[in-house]
Amino acid sequence: MIAFALLFAVVSAAEPKLAKAAEVEAPKAEAAKAEAAKAEAAKAPPKDDGALPEAVEAFFEKKGEDGKPVLSAAERALVKKLPLHTREKLGQAAADGRVRSPDHLKVLLSLELSPQSADLIFTDNCVLCHSDPGHAKRTRFSLDPKTAGTPERLNLKSMLSDAHFRRGLMCVGCHGGKTTDLEMTEEISQGWPDKNMRPYWIPQFCARCHADPTFMRNFNPSMPTDQYAKYQESRHGELLLKQKDRKAAQCVSCHGLHGIRGPKSRKSTVHAQAIPETCGHCHADAKYMAGYKRDDGSPLPTNQLEEFKKSVHGKALLEKGDLSAPACNDCHGNHASQPPAISSVSQVCRTCHVMNGTLFDGSKHKLAFEKHGWPECAKCHGKHDIEKPSIDLISDAKDGLCGSCHDEYSKDNPECNKGARYFHSTLVELTKVQKAIPPVAEHLAERGLDTEPILISAGELDEAIMQARTRVHTFDKGGFDVGATAGREAVEKTEKLIAEAHAERAFRRKGLLASIGVMGLLAVIIWLKIRELDRRRAAERAQNKP
């Protein structure tokens, strides 16, 4: 009890002091809490009420000569969709006069900018200045170069899809200066050579980045960085850099300028299907190519593009959309483009046609071709105008490919034409059967017969014919017969299956006739039995009458 009384006394004595301390600490706690709330509010992003900056709002209030607003409600909606910080950048650009008018803003909004692109453009004074329609004397980008009469390289829409721009490499990346510059600086003008000297300078200029592995690794680690080294050794590079021929192709001739896209883009000038037209821009222009010669001194032709479009390769690539079909660069190279030498033509072709080249290597024709210095594949198949090989290609007639060549170079060797005749007649025979099988199989299938074995055997014949056609490149009866014999076996097997199917059909027909006969006989017996029963019933009724 005494201890409890003492404790009560101590607490009672301390209460006034504690109450006074609480009175002092409470305001401090409230102040600290308010400061914390204020700091938290500062960290939070500002509330976006969708309002437009004052300078931008002024553009939407302006009217044209027809009394209608220059900017539409749809364009207002586009601006309001932009993030707050991007609208603020646009507002600052409008307030500073870098976006000068409603017409200028209309041009920018017509690009349907993504927030990312808008964020870049509204802070890039180069783009803003050179897209202003109010500066008639200034070289500027346009939305439609054909209508505006400006070069395609100044297509504003293409620039936004440019591979460099999309990676954040703005105008200053190539032209120099800073995106915040309000005027053209000496750095820009001094960094670019005279227009007449520019073609010689471009390859090395592009190589500043594209030949630097460390730099390119930051953007595309898989991209080669030896393009400039290859270009220097190419026919184009030799003409431009060594012979100072400014007409020779360089980087921008093929890739373009502000609208550069990667080769996988369908809109790229170096997409597989665009390559022929890109190369043909120069090589199909007789006037532009006048004076250029082959290594043998003959004029360089300009019909390559026309021939390629009609070829089996051109039709596969351009009409069927087969991107594995070769274009100009597959045979001539990309940055190291050269006309294929006679000795390398076969190596280029066998990049795809491996078996044909391997078989040819072991043939007698290989020795003859080397003796005469003929390009292996091109001698028979042509170059840019390659057609789909047909059986007639190996005809031994005097006007045929084999016959005409043998008539000139192997008159004393009748075995040459004999071999060609054998190849040709065998393939004609096999192909004749190949074409006859489908309608027969269809006819049998319509009559309810199982034609699956016939179709499987026909597939084996197709494969054998393909092998035989390929093995023509051995130019040897034994080598050719590896495929031909398999074809003959497939023909024999298929004909046997067809014969069995016809026999089964005949059996079914005989069985059907026999069945109909038996059923007819039964019907006659039943009918006779019924008549007999009817007569008995009639006789019984006659006897029972009174």
Image (cartoon, rainbow, N blue to C red):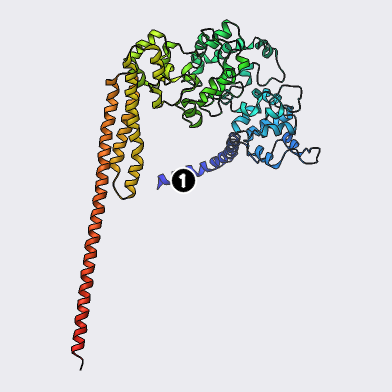
Residue 491 location (% of width, % of height):
28, 34
In this orientation, does residue 413 appear?
Answer: yes
Q: Position of residue 372 (x, y in %)?
A: 40, 9
Farthest residue to the bottom: give it: 546
Q: Position of residue 182 (x, y in %)?
A: 71, 20
Residue topped by disc 1 = 8
Q: Is residue 263 visible?
A: no
**Residue for point 39% across, 19% down:** 403
* Residue type at tag 1: Phe
Image quadrant holding the C terminus, namely bottom left
- Name the residue at the top extreme: 242
Query: What x and y, as percent, mark residue 118?
Result: 63, 31
Which residue sits at x=36%, y=36%? Answer: 435
- Picture quarter containing residue 240? top right
Circle 1 SS class: helix
- Which of these two is toward me, 534 or 379? 534
Q: Is residue 75 above or below residue 382?
A: below
Q: Nearer the viewer, residue 473 or 214?
A: 473
Q: Note whether 3 is above or below 434 in the view shown.
A: below
> Foreground residue, 463 or 479?
479
315 or 321: which is nearer to us? Answer: 315
